[in-house]
Amino acid sequence: MSNIAYFPTRPDPEDSRPGKRERTKVANRQAILDAARAVFGELGYETATVRDIIRRTGLASGTFYNYYKSKEEVFDALADDGARRFRPILRAESDKAVDFESFLRGAIRAYFDFLEGEHESWRINRPAGEVFPHARATPEIVAVFDEVRDAFAKVLEHDHAPAVDLDYFTAACIAVAREVGDKMLERRPIDVEGAADFAVRMILGGLPALPRS
Amino acid sequence: MSNIAYFPTRPDPEDSRPGKRERTKVANRQAILDAARAVFGELGYETATVRDIIRRTGLASGTFYNYYKSKEEVFDALADDGARRFRPILRAESDKAVDFESFLRGAIRAYFDFLEGEHESWRINRPAGEVFPHARATPEIVAVFDEVRDAFAKVLEHDHAPAVDLDYFTAACIAVAREVGDKMLERRPIDVEGAADFAVRMILGGLPALPRS
DNA sequence: TGAAATCATGACGGGGCGTCATCTGGCCTC
DNA sequence: GAGGCCAGATGACGCCCCGTCATGATTTCA
């Protein structure tokens, strides 16, 4: 009979590598992020309040403030999370690329795929006209931005030497990608390939290089 | 002695075409906008509260709500105001232009000049790191956007026929102008000419056409 | 097992929000 | 110029959100 109990001496059958203390902490933090994503999606960022997020977690109000200081901080954490997931993808493209064009095309394509994927976690049910703030300069986002600029610098140098104003150029490229990406998401069906092609041509050759419709 | 009084029978020496009623209305509306501009400039948009704006006007709280429903609505009114002032400038450029390049150069130059001018009414004293929301789609802003697209359509058609995706193209151009414009404002000295040249070349010829530094 | 550390809890004071009953003074009529 | 009318200015009010903190429950450690 001694073998009937699966875990006779351990009251905790779950993976308990980290102490319970630690586990509830990560669970709470995650619960807050999940609740925030849902609430921002349903109410819009501006309308949403910290209490809305708290209510959805079921936690006490004080608990929220053990993890984040404000609505902004939660939003930044979500943005940071997105950037953190995107960074390795971008790096992979950077490593894979052989020249500027292939890097650019890979990076933009990757970004648009990423956008399309994220799209659904967010735009659930949002009242029309509501708008999201553009992600603020969180550490991870700055890192992505810098990584793009550095990759540009490296690839361009290796490609052909002429030095352009990297700050302007990076800002312009990201602006084009972001804006065309946004517009892409508004169309049905969503055409990642077409949008990426447009953005790449725009950056590489400007107006004369754009695809004709 | 009867001619000593300058306005013997009219108690109101000022231009009194509209009644006093109407004049205080305009004055209040303007006072609220002025106060809002100052408060947004000093506290940043996020931090500012409706009460901050109200306090600065010296009006009663209820009075504010006779004119605007919320902080957002005041901000939109300010943005609308900017767009309304910019529109005729843009139209003048559109009329003056003979081909796409001259239109683009004129419009971007005008926008950057406008930006530099507005700059000072806003960035007084703002705590670092604070960020403004990108202007929402108010009627006047949509009008400017549409005007740009229509001007693009007309000039491009007249220039050389090949049809591009106008929505993407307009969005991309505005994105480039906005982002390069923002970066321009962060540099000292502010170089409107250089920034405009960069943006124009970027749009017209992409990377290969950019000025070398 | 008992002490210490950790942290979830929710009540609380502070303050911003938008409303509304009241009052003020400009406007119109005679 | 007297009197009535009404647009609209006023600010107190009730509501809710904010962030804090004293308390207590639970885990961890000795």
Image (cartoon, coloured by chain):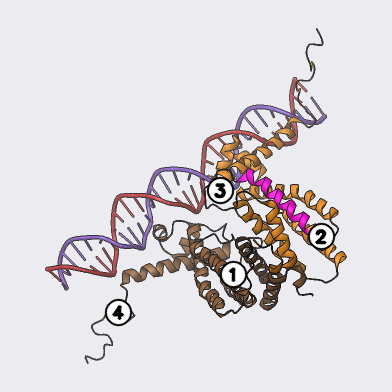
Chain colours: A orange, B brown, C red, D purple
Task: Tell me where residue B43 appears, x and y as whole percent.
Answer: 57, 62
Secondary element under disc 1, as helix, strand or loop, is helix
| Circle 2 residue | A151
Q: CA distance from mark 3 to mark 4?
A: 51 Å
Q: Are marks 4 and 2 in contact (CB under 8 Å)?
A: no
Q: Chain of mark 2?
A: A
What's under tag 2, amino acid-wise?
Answer: Ala
Q: CA distance from mark 1 to mark 2?
A: 33 Å
Name the residue at 85% across, 62% down: A154
Q: Chain of mark 1?
A: B
What's under tag 1, amino acid-wise?
Answer: Phe
First in sequence: mark 4 or mark 1? 4
Screen quadrant of the N terminus of chain B: bottom left
The image's mark for residue B152 is 1
Span shown in magenta = A104-129
Name the residue at 74% across, 51% down: A110
Number of other residues with Cα within 10 Å of mark 1, as a class: few under 14, some 14 to 19, many 20 or more: some
What's under tag 4, amino acid-wise?
Answer: Asp
Q: Chain of mark 4?
A: B
**Camera-side mark, 3 or 4:** 3
The image's mark for residue A68 is none
What's under tag 3, amino acid-wise?
Answer: Gly
**Camera-side mark, 1 or 2:** 1
| Circle 3 residue | A44
Q: Are marks 3 and 2 in contact (CB under 8 Å)?
A: no
**Camera-side mark, 4 or 2:** 2
Q: CA distance from mark 1 to mark 3?
A: 33 Å
Confirm whether circles 1 and 2 share one chain: no
| Circle 4 residue | B12
Query: Going by the picture, which residue comes out furthest to the top?
Result: A1
